[in-house]
Amino acid sequence: MFLGIDIGTSGVKAALLDEYGAVVAQASAPLCVLRPHPLWSEQAPDDWWVATDVSVQALPVELRRHVRAIGLAGQMHGAILLGANDRPLRPAILWNDGRSFNQCGDIEANEPGSRAITGNLMMPGFTAPKLAWVSQNEPEIFAQVKTVLLPKDYVRLSMSGDKASDLSDAAGTLWLDVGRRDWSDAMLAATHLTRAQMPALFEGNQVTGVLRAEIARQWGMEPVPVAAGAGDNAAGAVGVGVVNEGDALLSLGTSGVIFVATGQFRPNPARAVHVFCHCLPEMWHQMSVHLSAASCLDWAARQVGMDVPGLLRCAESAEADTVEELFLPYLSGERTPHNDPHVRGAWLRLDNETSPARLARAVLEGVAFAHADGLDALREAGTQVEELAVIGGGSQSLFWGRIFAAALNVRLAYLEGGDVGPALGAARLARMALTGESADQVCTRPPVRHIMEPDPRQVEILAPKREAFRRAYAAIKSL
């Protein structure tokens, strides 16, 4: 039995895989996000550990006894600042926090080779500018920083006492030389940090330590090995077999991602495409990243007084060719292709005939249009995508999938277990770390439960709306 733990933004999920690779149990515990000021997004690191403990202990005790290794996945880019006693000095600054926009320019000025080293445009969502913000705005805290960790790696510290990270997650800090797969002294110096403050680096399928004896007793298992694991998107990719050149997925969680595995380091920072290490040796990946995806459904459902299933049913009652409304899903700003933390969402083209059903459908279409913009940016980087495996909570709605297939004009493959997400990949990495098996042996593609081809009529209907959506960003940007 192999245990995968995913430290998400809205909750922690734990999943158990048996010796045959099947998910036999899963459990979760919720988390909340703190937004004390505009653009801020924070969480208390100790809440992750509490939620991890709750989710693991919710798994059947008779199965937990047979766990042989543990893998970790987690939300990327979070900044956890530890002092000399390895305790957090302040709340963690999350991936969707936009306060450090000005510091991005400062870092690139301090290190003109930034984009060549990291392969990425400096953005406020990444970890490095968050530390620059702390340095300038909370100098008394910055002076006490002994270690900087990422979310899943703070949980690792609680589990095993090790300060370690994997390369896929570390690449999202923008302190990594992504092509060389090592910390960059130049990028660290640009934010007045050193290697001594960074965790040790491992490939995702390597062991970083073992479970503390007291935690093992608490969870009813042996002090088993803990694998390095992965950032959430790379772990999700491993979970559905996206491990070879050209394999691609669409992840619809709180945020949205189009992820393409590559055998080479192929950056395109000018279009805000992310290029990170994969969690497997000698592999990289490209991503278009959208800060709001399924979170838009939660938000819209609240506005019209429904739950999300009700919102989806309501949207389905509106015919595509009757919906003129547009929704811009920039509730937390946007990354690909705009790199704009300040832009905000909007419903446009409302009239006297606007109804909750039309508003709901516009939300689903708007999120899909944003991902279509991201796919265009990936294609500009030389990436060809003919099919996307769909994972994440949003994969449960085939109706939304029909809209996505038409907006992106690509085939979607819905896989068994796709809703398990990064926890599945984390468990697979744990298995590889323990057994030494290869990715081709362990990271097989799950069975396909549904193929969604683009409907030509829907493609035709959505095309002019997508063009209007593209123009709308420029129209509202100055507002």
Image (cartoon, grey):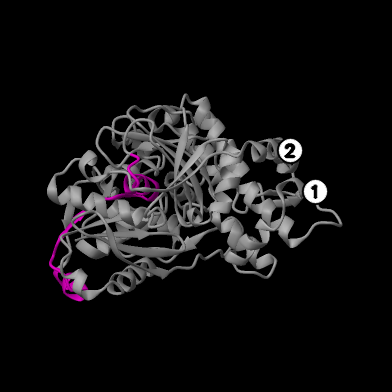
The residue under label 2 is 468
Q: Residues within 10 Å of mark 1 (few under 14, many from 20)?
A: few
Q: Which residues are magenta?
A: 213-242
In this view, 266 is above or below 396: above
Residue at left offset 67%, top offset 57%: 315
Determine whether, in the image, residue 449 is placed left or right of residue 351: left
In this view, 334 is above or below 141: above
Whether residue 292 appears in this view of the structure is: no
Residue at left offset 39%, top offset 31%: 246
Residue 227 image label: none
Determine whether, in the image, residue 163 is placed left or right of residue 239: left
User: Where does the N terminus fall, quadrant-wise?
Assistant: bottom left
Tell me the kind of residue under disc 2: Ala
Percent from the top left, x then y, of residue 364?
Answer: 63, 52
Residues under numbered marks 1 and 2 in contact, where contact means CB atoms less than 8 Å apart = yes
Residue at left offset 68%, top offset 70%: 305
